Amino acid sequence: MAGRQTKKTGTSSKGGRALLHSKKFWIVILAFLLLIAIPQCSGGTKSDTQPTAEASASSSAPESSEPTDTASSSTPVPTDTATTDAAPAPENTAAAASGDAAQSSLATTVLETLPVKGRAPKTGYSRDQFGQAWSDVDHNGCDTRNDILKRDMTNVTFKSGTHDCVVLTGTLDDPYTGTTIQFQRGQRTSTAVQIDHVVALSDAWQTGAQQLSSDQRLQLANDPYNLLAVDGPANEQKSDSDAASWLPSNTAFRCEYVARQIGVKSKYSLWVTQGEKSAMQTVLSSCPTQTVPTDGGVSQGAKVATAAAAQNSTAQASSGSGSGSNSGAAAAQQPAQTADSGSSDVYYGSCSDVRAAGKAPLYAGQPGYRSGLDKDHDGVACEAKK
């Protein structure tokens, strides 16, 4: 009996061990499953994901338009303030720079940069101090006079065989008088349109040009920035005057005229006299936004004003005398013909003598002009060689 019990117990023990073995297996399995499941529910995982959500919320906070969001935390406030203050700064800086650039080009501003001195003696001045008249300084094959005629006139035609270098005819809306001049190259007509040095060479000589090199003076005399095609008699009337003693009769052009004088004097480091500066300030007081011209020729605005003045002048001439649109040219030629009668007082044996006297080129009607010096009989003697 006892043997049987022992056997039974042994059998039972074996079964228990198997059962125990089976429980360990499932415990291991359960423990493994718990290890997987616990992180999904644990606070540690939640805290890992929470900063991401908070960071996302924090990064979107500055874009919020709600004022309460900005006020709810002290951290976003400096961020919003920095963003608001920094964004417009480049635009304001650019606007300020643009304003400074515009301000610096005002004629009144540039005028203040010019030295004010008394006029130096004219001793030693001659046209030759500024090189040969109408030299081809830009080396385009054409002399300066014809370059300016071509630039400033409309309906231009050229002498054949000159590579469009010699202007035969053209129409000029004269900025000095506000009249329209029909230009025709010829012995008695070429003087109707002359090329004016806006800052006269004699005036330049007495306000600093003596200190320039010969090359700089040559450049000044032929610089398109200092040259305008204008009514001949008006140019002769101006002579070597500055703004204190002469201004264009076309009041619509006075502001630009004075501004260009200021620009030329600034470009070539010349000075102004006190009387000249006062006269310029008086003119510019009527146009405080006038800027210094940046290139050669008459501005579009001045061209429009001059064209309007020319139309009015033509209309008045037509109603008064019936002379038509050519009245400007006829009037321009009159002083030249008058001057021609007294030309015998001056005599030049050759163009070398004319150049030595600083009078080249010599136009029909001017003292010393004679047909013997005018080889092509176009009204201009002793021109620069082409």
Image (cartoon, rainbow, N blue to C red):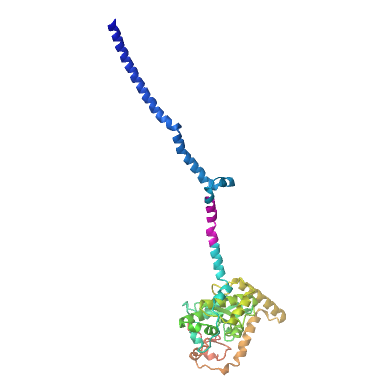
Residue 206 colored in magenta in the image: no
Residue 118, image x, y percentages: 55, 84
Q: Nearer the viewer, residue 122 or 354?
A: 122
Question: Is residue 223 placed above or below 92 in the rendered structure?
Answer: below
Residue 104, image x, y percentages: 55, 70
Number of marks in the rendered image: 0
Residue at the outermost top position: 1
Residue 127 in sight: yes
Residue at the outermost bottom position: 345
Q: What residue is at 61 percent from the left and 73 percent from the top?
A: 302
Residue 83 colored in magenta in the image: yes
Q: Main secondary structure of the magenta part?
A: helix
Residue 292 in sight: no
Q: What residue is at 37 percent from the left and 22 percent from the top?
A: 26
Q: What residue is at 52 percent from the left and 84 percent from the top?
A: 205
Residue at the outermost left position: 3
Q: Is residue 267 left or right of residue 252?
A: left
Question: Is residue 110 placed above or below 200 in the rendered structure?
Answer: above
| Boundaries of the magenta span | 79-93
Residue 265, image x, y percentages: 53, 78
Residue at the outermost right position: 319
Q: Nearer the viewer, residue 154 or 217?
A: 217
Residue 317, image x, y percentages: 69, 80
